[in-house]
Image: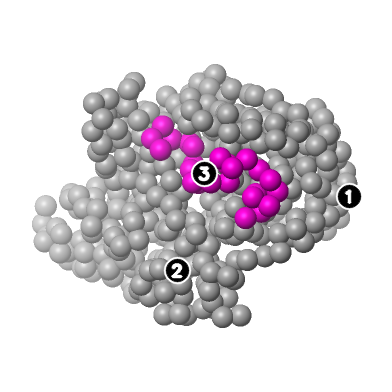
Amino acid sequence: MSFSKDVLIIDLEAEAQRIGGEIRRIVAHECKRRGLVVALSGGIDSSCVAGLAVKALGPTKVFGVHMPERDSSGETLGLSQSVSTTLGFDSTVEILTPILEGFGCYQRRDEAIRMVFPDFGPGWKSKIVLPGLDGGELNVYSVVVQKPDGTIEKQRLPLKAYLQIVAATNFKQRTRKTLEYYHADRLNYAVTGTPNRLEYDQGFFVKGGDGLADVKPIAHLYKTQVYAMAKHLGLPADICSRAPTTDTYSLAQGQDEFYFSLPYAQMDLALWARNHGVPPIEAAPVIGITAEQVERVFRDIDQKRITTRYLGLKAQLCGAVPEIAG
Amino acid sequence: MPAPDATAVQRDVTAFIVDNFLFGNTAEAPAPATSFMETALIDSTGVLELVAFIEEKYGFKVADDELIPENLDSVANLAGFVVKKAG
């Protein structure tokens, strides 16, 4: 197949049916559970997974959990509830903020930011970002803060501050997963994971957090295909047109500045090209960047696969236990 | 502080890598020209550790635009960078 934007076009109904069959097989026979829990973030991925789960099992066998916290966007809860309402399945709201306060999530994160901005405190907002595609720099994170007067400042993160900010914010994904498993255990259901192919391939998840699940129905779908599938499944228009966001930091943060080199539509094409051996010179005009930039994105894809391999590894044994299937 | 020479920096950086990344296994120490990234020996978090090490040991700050493979992606590149900065 020659490389063009059309490579991402799939037969959506046929794929939804195939995924539905897999969901039924996995939940019934691999997991031996009676339904699925879906954590709803108001984003495209979890909404699409909810749509596929309902199509596969019916609305009475799907349970949604909405889990906003202090740093969530104000529109998060309304958007995620519109999904459960539209698809007609039961759900509950779990406000994470007091749990995260108990863990010291915000306090530990702010303490780390103060290693770089000593005055950081109430009224300030923050996010962490990677250098852009043209910087030529290694993938080293910076913290961006907005002061109470609105001014923005950016500083590269030293090792200790970087690790502590990530460690503290990872409480959010791990707390969400704990609550998902609470509801799954209570209902005798299995838990869904909602990564798309970009996230799954490039390790954009927290180990033991959003990376933990019994079934990941859209991990093979490029993000462009997830948007198309969500529309095909009849999800609310506000969900289908919403730009991807991490919804994890208090300053608005696009996934492309936090983790990926390019916005998702271009990143999908770059990943497809990398997976199918398309030369940079041929991929460049389709993606809309230069061949040199494609080479840099390809290197970044390879590098992220290597450096995030640990996230997908199961616990490693130091001696064989052949009686237990892996 | 006297200006470091490249051989001494290579020795110090290699010792840091062996101690910090390889738990003392000198048999896996990288050759001076070996790319850390291509061999997956050191990832982007490891780069931060190396930066912290050379900043502390040689007493200078690494600027954002100096965080490039030409300065940091092998023992030899690091040594050349440190000699240039600290010299």
Picture coordinates of residue A150, whole percent (x, y): 26, 30
Q: Say above or below: A72 vs A49.
A: above
Q: Disc 3 marks which residue?
A: A242
Question: Magenta stretch containing residue A220, yes or no?
Answer: no
Name the residue type under label 1: His
In this figure, which colouring scheme has been used for the structure? Answer: one colour
Name the residue type under label 3: Arg
In this view, the residue in front, A45 or A214, is: A45
Q: Which mark is residue A287?
A: 2
Picture coordinates of residue A75, whole percent (x, y): 51, 30
Q: Chain of mark 1?
A: A
Q: Residues within 10 Å of mark 3 (few under 14, many from 20)?
A: few
Picture coordinates of residue A37, whole percent (x, y): 74, 37
Q: Say above or below: B16 vs A236.
A: below
In this view, the residue in front, B76 or A13, is: A13
Q: Chain of mark 2?
A: A
Name the residue type under label 2: Ile
Nearer the camera: disc 2 or disc 1: 2
| Residue A264 seen | yes
Q: Disc 1 marks which residue?
A: A29
Q: Magenta region: which residues? A: A228-252
Task: Give me the C-alpha separation between circle 3 and circle 1.
Answer: 35 Å
| Residue A197 seen | no
Residue at image x 62%, y 58%?
A225
Q: Earlier in the sequence, mark 3 or mark 1?
A: 1
- A304 vs A87, left or right, is left
